[in-house]
């Protein structure tokens, strides 16, 4: 790949056209778009450098390369107790991409799982890669339900930008023409496993309101995509360690190399942005203040336009710390909504079942993807519910397990051993992903008493699920059980595991977009209502959460805002 | 309340901490016997007993190595030492001792070193092949014990419940070690580190000759 131009500690530029804070999904897109439009752009990342391929030390490891296998060890749980709450993120092959909770503490008035990585590429390296467009069912939802505030945009505003980013990213999936889940610019879909296809046919036969499709996922399934030599997915399913093939989209493999290729990007890792600087005369931001994570030196950088893409919580924390006489409660916080309305997707509720049959069938490849059952609730007419608003979709999948428990003779011994190396019975799981509503009282705030190693305030979470989500969960479990049973699955059992906000790793909403500066932080172009040359395009900007995975929408919003910013700069409007 | 639930689950979870089908492995998977290896969690006596148990679970068969050939006891000991948490470790220690005591009694022997494969087979059969009713009753007795502990009531661990839980957990751990062993994965299952393609529903025989994919 192209060597990224890294800033050395001495003799560096401090004036740029644009500054991008963060290098994850959103920051990568801001960097790419702004540099391609000719802006000299400084990209700041609080964590260490991670170069595509070079810095994926575990990408080819097998389980036996670790003394205890691909597990979370007791030592890891000690250093990463919160990061380990998912049960899968901090295994031996991935733990280095998640923060050390002791070094990077946060506080919980109520439990909140804030799972993140501090390195170039951010969570674009470890994300779930599920990529779904939102629709007007989502953008109109708040207005229709009369809750929170209305989105200042509609699907038509974002549709061309979805297309724009999808052509670069590569989204594999199946076109369905559903109004609640618009189709992307698809690469060929991955294939359904036998039991998944069986469930799909059963849904078709027994329901007229729901369909099963293969997950829409940011993987190349045909041809190549631009960046650092990205080729087709090799079906290794080792994505979150970094992919040497660039088979899935990440900042490291795609947007950052493209930004670098323009010659306009300066990337500076180890740079903790904690304040946006403001000039009350011009009423614009003038730059940012950083602490060098290694030297602890404070440095100011100047630019005409600033993109905060540090993640919902971190971008919000930066604005909260950007206090001045003009902004006593944090920059852009005249509405008092900054830090409020925090959302996630609630999940870990659904059902599993076993299937008798297809014994002579199997699959090839470790498909890094599952199935998707798009939302079928509260879409009008017979789909409307009295007990809750909004909806959910299911992700999940079917495969063959290990040995079967039910044969007594096989409990141990030679036959048991033989069973281990043979495919077991088929099973299928459906896991609901539901919308969380924006509640003003669900919030994050800063604790200036508990500071981190750089003397910066730490984040405290105070948020919980409420009645609408709990009622939705009941339906999520019940429908999953019913669909599996109707399709002839055996031993179907529903579950509702403990879920707390944050575990979906989809934090959203803490600097929401809206039409009115009195009730929202950002406008329809992701500009702070109060400071037009500051843009926030990560999860913080979301006015509602929908039930679809949000990253694709962050990408589209970021590309759209970046193009708008460049036009406004040209017109001298910002 | 949460602590009670956690306690109740102890002994039902060690060896099955992660839900992913990803299997675990051995560092020294290619070596047969490790001269000078000493267990770090178990005592030498406990390790010797457990090695005998898992070798009856996964014996050497024609063309395929078993637990002792693969030194799986090292994985089991390392897992208990480095992966499970302190509460689970305490239970594992207690359960191992109770199991050894019960096996000695059942075999009418004095020393653990005298226990042989036959003695282990008898225990495995008594617990892993018991009727579902018997197994449920044993599980319940163990849960009652944990509930009493949580309520601060003195209680004696139920021998049968503990042995059952111990053997199931040990089996899960042994399978994890076995599946994640490089020799088993590469030579006895179908190992494809870079599959390169994905087909959703194909003939089992054509895909793998009837074997399971490793990884």
Image (cartoon, rainbow, N blue to C red):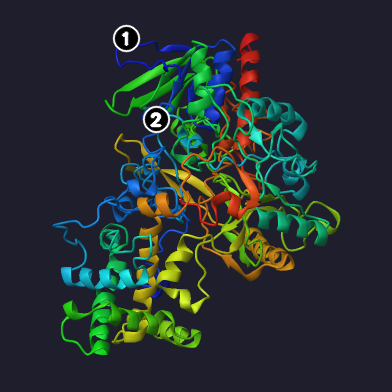
Using the image, tell me which numbered label, if any, was put on residue A571.
none
The alpha-carbon separation of the residues under discs 1 and 2 comes to 20 Å
Question: Where does the image place residue A84, in percent across and percent down from the top left?
Answer: 40, 52
Callout 1: 10 Å neighbours few (<14), some, many (20+)? Answer: few
Question: Where does the image place residue B2, in percent across and percent down from the top left?
Answer: 42, 69
Callout 2: 10 Å neighbours few (<14), some, many (20+)? Answer: many
Q: Can residue A410 be seen in this view?
A: yes
Q: Is mark 1 on a helix, strand or loop?
A: loop
Please state which of residues A151 and B200 is positioned toward the viewer in this rendering. Answer: B200
Please state which of residues B26 and A299 is positioned toward the viewer in this rendering. Answer: B26
Please state which of residues A251 and A455 is positioned toward the viewer in this rendering. Answer: A251
Name the residue carrying label 1.
Answer: A11
Q: Which of pointers 1 and 2 lies earlier in the amino acid sequence?
A: 1
Name the residue carrying label 2.
Answer: A46
Asked if A288 appears above or below A91 in the picture, the reply is above
For the point 21% across and 67% down, which residue is it? B42
Q: Can residue A529 be seen in this view?
A: no
Asked if A488 appears above or below A92 in the picture, the reply is below
Asked if B186 appears above or below A527 in the picture, the reply is below
Question: Where does the image place residue A360, in percent across and percent down from the top left?
Answer: 63, 59
Residue A384's quadrant in the figure? bottom right
Question: Where does the image place residue A103, in percent across and percent down from the top left?
Answer: 31, 42
Q: Is residue A254 left or right of residue A242?
A: right
Q: Which residue in the rendered view is the most extreme toward the front?
A: B62
Q: Is residue A377 left or right of residue A110?
A: right
Residue A573's quadrant in the figure? top right
Task: Say which chain tag 2 marks.
Answer: A
Task: Say which chain tag 1 marks.
Answer: A
Asked if A288 appears above or below A188 in the picture, the reply is above
For the point 38% across and 49% down, which residue is it? A63
Residue A450's quadrant in the figure? top left
Please state which of residues A353 and A25 is positioned toward the viewer in this rendering. Answer: A353
């Amino acid at each position: 790949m192209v060597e990224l131009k890294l800033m050395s500690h001495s003799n560096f530029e401090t004036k740029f056209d644009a500054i991008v804070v963060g290098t994850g999904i959103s920051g990568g897109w801001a960097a790419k778009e702004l540099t391609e439009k000719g802006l000299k752009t400084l990209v700041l990342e609080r964590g260490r450098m991670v170069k595509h391929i070079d810095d994926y030390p575990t990408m080819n490891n097998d389980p036996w390369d670790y003394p205890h296998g691909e597990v979370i060890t007791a030592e890891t749980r000690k250093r990463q107790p919160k990061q380990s709450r998912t049960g899968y993120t901090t295994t031996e092959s991935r733990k280095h991409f998640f923060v050390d909770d002791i070094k990077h503490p946060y506080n919980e008035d109520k439990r909140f799982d804030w799972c993140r990585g501090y390195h170039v590429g951010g969570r674009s390296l470890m994300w779930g890669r599920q990529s779904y467009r939102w629709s007007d069912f989502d953008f109109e939802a708040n207005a229709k339900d009369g809750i929170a505030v209305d989105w200042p945009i509609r699907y038509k505003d974002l549709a061309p930008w979805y297309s724009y980013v999808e052509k670069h990213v590569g989204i594999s999936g199946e076109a369905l023409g559903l109004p609640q889940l618009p189709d992307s610019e698809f690469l060929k879909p991955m294939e359904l496993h036998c039991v998944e296809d069986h469930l799909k046919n059963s849904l078709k036969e027994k329901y007229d309101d729901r369909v099963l499709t293969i997950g829409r996922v940011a993987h190349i399934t045909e041809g190549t995509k631009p960046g650092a030599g990205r080729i087709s997915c090799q079906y290794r399913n080792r994505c979150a360690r970094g992919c040497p093939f660039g088979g899935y989209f990440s900042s490291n493999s795609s947007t950052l190399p493209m930004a670098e290729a323009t010659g306009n990007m300066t990337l500076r890792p180890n740079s903790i942005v904690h304040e946006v600087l403001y000039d009350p005369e011009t009423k614009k931001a003038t730059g940012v203040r950083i602490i060098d994570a290694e030297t602890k030196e404070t440095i100011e950088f100047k630019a005409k336009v600033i993109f905060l893409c540090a993640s919902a919580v971190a971008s919000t924390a930066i604005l909260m710390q950007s206090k001045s006489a003009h902004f006593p409660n944090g920059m852009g916080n005249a509405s008092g909504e900054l830090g409020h309305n925090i959302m996630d997707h609630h999940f870990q509720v659904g059902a599993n079942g076993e299937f008798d049959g297809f014994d002579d069938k199997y699959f090839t490849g470790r498909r890094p993807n599952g199935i998707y059952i798009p939302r079928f609730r509260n879409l009008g007419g017979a789909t409307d519910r009295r007990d809750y608003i909004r909806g959910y979709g299911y992700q999940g999948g079917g495969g063959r397990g290990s040995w079967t428990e039910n044969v007594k003779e096989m409990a141990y011994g030679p036959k048991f051993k033989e069973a281990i190396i043979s495919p077991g019975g088929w099973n299928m799981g459906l896991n609901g992903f539901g919308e969380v509503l924006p509640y003003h009282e669900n919030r994050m705030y800063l604790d200036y008493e508990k500071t981190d190693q750089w003397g910066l305030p730490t984040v405290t979470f105070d948020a919980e699920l409420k009645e609408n989500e709990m009622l939705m969960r009941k339906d999520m479990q019940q429908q999953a059980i019913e669909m599996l049973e109707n399709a002839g699955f055996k031993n179907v059992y529903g579950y509702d595991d403990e879920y707390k906000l944050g575990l979906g790793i989809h934090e959203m909403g803490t600097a929401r977009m809206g039409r009115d500066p009195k009730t929202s932080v950002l406008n329809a172009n992701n500009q702070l209502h109060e400071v037009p040359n500051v843009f926030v395009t990560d999860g913080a900007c979301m006015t509602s959460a929908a039930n679809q995975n949000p990253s694709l929408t962050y990408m589209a919003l970021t590309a759209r805002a970046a193009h708008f910013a460049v036009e406004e700069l040209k017109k001298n409007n910002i | 309340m949460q602590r009670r639930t956690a306690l109740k689950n102890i002994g039902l979870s060690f060896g099955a901490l992660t839900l992913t089908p990803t299997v675990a492995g051995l560092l020294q998977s290619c070596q047969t016997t490790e001269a000078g290896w000493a267990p770090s969690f178990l005592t030498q006596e406990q390790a010797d007993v457990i090695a005998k148990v898992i070798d009856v679970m996964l014996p050497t068969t024609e063309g395929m190595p078993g637990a002792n050939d693969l030194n799986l006891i090292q994985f089991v000991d390392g897992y208990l030492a480095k992966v499970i948490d302190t509460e689970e470790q305490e239970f594992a220690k207690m359960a191992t001792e109770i199991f050894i005591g019960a096996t000695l009694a059942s075999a009418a022997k004095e020393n653990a070193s005298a226990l042989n494969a036959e003695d282990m087979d008898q225990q495995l059969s008594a617990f892993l092949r018991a009727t579902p009713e018997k197994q449920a009753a044993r599980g319940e007795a163990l849960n009652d014990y944990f509930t009493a502990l949580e309520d601060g009531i003195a209680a004696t661990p139920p021998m049968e419940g503990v042995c059952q839980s111990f053997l199931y957990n040990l089996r899960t751990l042994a399978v994890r070690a076995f599946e994640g062993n490089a020799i088993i994965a590469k030579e006895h299952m179908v190992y494809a580190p870079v599959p390169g393609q994905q087909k959703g529903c194909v003939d089992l025989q054509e895909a793998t000759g009837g074997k399971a994919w490793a990884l």
